[in-house]
Image: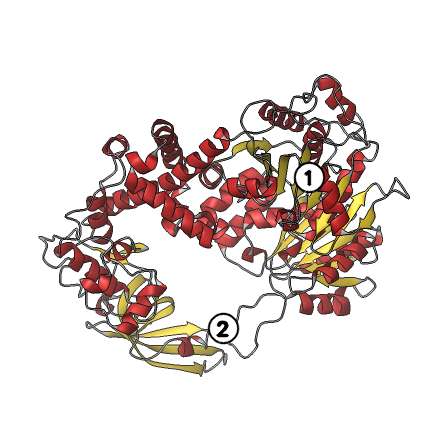
Amino acid sequence: MRFSDPLSAHVRVDGAHQKSLKRLNIETVGSLLYHLPARYEDITDVQSVGGLEKGQEAVVYGQLSGLKTRKAWKSRKPIAEGMVEDGSAKMKIMWFNQPYIAKMYTDGMYVKLAGKVAGSEGKLYLSNPEVEPLDSLPVDRHDSLFVGTDANLDDTLYPIYRETKGVTSRWLYHTALKLFEQGALKALIDPIPKEILNKYNLPDLPSALVFAHSPKKAKDAEAARKRFAFEEVFYIQIQKAQERAAVSAAQTYTIVTGKDHLAAFTDRFPFDLTGSQANSINEILKDFGSNHAMSRLLEGDVGSGKTAVAATTAYAVATSRPPEGMKSGGEGAGLSAIDYGALQIAYMAPTEILAKQHFESFIEYFHHLPIQIGLITGSGCMKFPSKTDPTKPTKISKKQLTDWIRNGEVPIVIGTHALIYKSVEFKHLAYVIIDEQHRFGTNQRKKLAKKDARIPHLLSMTATPIPRTLALTIYGDLDITLLDEMPKGRKPVKTTIVGPGQSKAMYEHVESELTNGRQAYVICPRIDEPDPTKENALNMKSVIAEAKRLKKDVFQNWTIATLHGKMTPAEKDKVMKDFSEHKIDILCATSVIEVGVSVANATNIIIEGAERFGLAQLHQLRGRVIRGTHQAHCFAVTESKSDKTRNRLKALATAKNGFELAEHDLQFRGGGELYGGKQSGLSDLGMEAIRNLKLVEAARTEAKHLVAKHPNLARDFPLIHEKVIHLGAVLHME
């Protein structure tokens, strides 16, 4: 039996079942055995219904019956109720103020219930239990779970798998055992070298699969999870190490700039560079002067001055010569406006709004210099300066702008993904700056450079706080620079957590700020109201309804507008223009304003349903109101009374910076929820693994060593090469 064999060659699977398995990406023997349990139930915690006592926190497995709704006799509050039976006895279950539960589940359904035993002797019931539906009861508690083993009382771990309609967790478990019995592991070769496994005390692949699917002890399951987590991160690190090696091997532009030349540019800034900005610029210039193309991630809080770093380093490039002309750089090096042939910069932003903002910022930085700046977006092109008015930009045709870019007459080009279109060709593209788009690989850089054999330097920038472990894993091909210092005079945002019934003081404060000439954002988790016919619809505030309510009941004297993802780019631009020109006082929006929107006069932000957002996202949203010098305020509004929610939001109010918050969020929510497993090429298990810095660093170290020692991985480690190729294909598809 081989891992590549179709599952149907060894297990009876009909057509419908095959379709169901495909939904779980299970088609071969290997894909089933790599469908690892999501978690394990320790059935020593399970109590029999017949032995429960009042006040006890109970976990029971059983079958539901008699589900119905009624109203309490005195209070008339709605109650859902039913019975649960586990073979030892029957017991009543009651859910107060949750009548919809009786409709969510059906009589005869198998469930796991966890709740508190209430009532009186002879009339005990399980109060408001959490319900987990099961396709079958996992095990008769009086038998051993592990059929055909010398099981003892410790054999109480039961694997729970991710299911789909038609494929139960129990079927997956028994099929895995059946494949083991048929010899699925006999000819299995472990791709990871033995010395690496021994160094980190990891089980080999056959042992890890047995430990994962049928652990005798919790220690077995932990060892298996550790091995598979390491394996996932290791393959990603191999891929990243190969990408780095490819970039290092490629020819690039060497750019050397004199200190006096650079100082002439930065001395004009209306602010002093922070120590962090100066260090970042020096690191980038050092990379420019080496023989290898830079690959760097600049990570900094909102308002930490990333654009100033980008502009300064772009100036160094735009005033440098390509290799075939005068040698680049040198003390006081610089080019005149008509001396074409300078090196070029492409600055790519994720949205048109942001691209236009960067265009305006660069005009501010470069307006005193004879350097042309172009803007390319899906809705049109612009160039600065205009021939008729050198102080302003002008609209031009795409053909005219792309001709000038091809000739090298426009050194700085800002735009959206439109920059990668075939019609946009650079003469000497030496530097690519990417805003909030870190998945910009070697091939895309080559695509931008087009006909030039040299690969450009890359600076990827983000205001999204990224935990160190995640950055090392997902952005392992990039060097990381932190902008961890805010400009002088910038006041930190005052963050207030607003609980149920506490909105009055918040609205009064915002009203006073509006009276003083300031503006405000109101953020809601959804665009439209939920369907009222669905009893279990999530009760979240929507942009459209909230804007109407605020205008009618709270801010009658102020102009309110909405901004959300269903609007066209032109509609969004119009609203943002009106808001930035203060024709709008309050902007009610979804998290579409999360990245990059900059209106210095907006000093207040109300975030409704704050518990629905991650801490990193809340921090990004809060960053919209620290663009000016006025004191900014953020109100995180939640209807939740849960301690977990309060503690998580408390971290938002107390954390010193976004980096600290990112680590909080990783612990509170896990990496998968934060950044999305598919987006990063990691499974849920891999995303959980990135909480472990030592594991990530170990995988990274071993991957770098392996690639450095064995550049021809396909020849020396064909199994690892196959895994990495497969990983690349999966990421490309997604």
Q: Which mark is residue 536?
A: 2
x, y (%) of residue 255? 64, 24
Residue at x-position 79% and y-position 52%:
580
Which quadrant of the rendered structure holds the N terminus? bottom left
x, y (%) of residue 526? 60, 64
Q: What residue type is labelled 1?
A: Gly
Q: From the viewer's perspective, is 10 left or right of 169? A: left
Which structural element holds mark 2? loop
Which structural element holds mark 1? loop
Q: Residue 711 carries which label?
A: none
Q: Which amino acid does label 2 sit on?
A: Asn
x, y (%) of residue 353? 71, 52
Taking 388 as reference, is 113 above or below it?
below
Disc 1 packing (10 Å; few <14; some 14–19; many ≥20): many
Q: From the viewer's perspective, is 58 left or right of 298? A: left
Which residue lies under the disc numbered 1?
303
Spatial CA span between label 1 and label 2:
40 Å
Taking 305 as reference, is 179 above or below it?
below
Which callout, 1 or 2, points at the residue further toward the start of the chain? 1
Q: Which of 365 and 123 is in front in this view?
A: 365
Taking 491 as reference, is 124 above or below it?
below
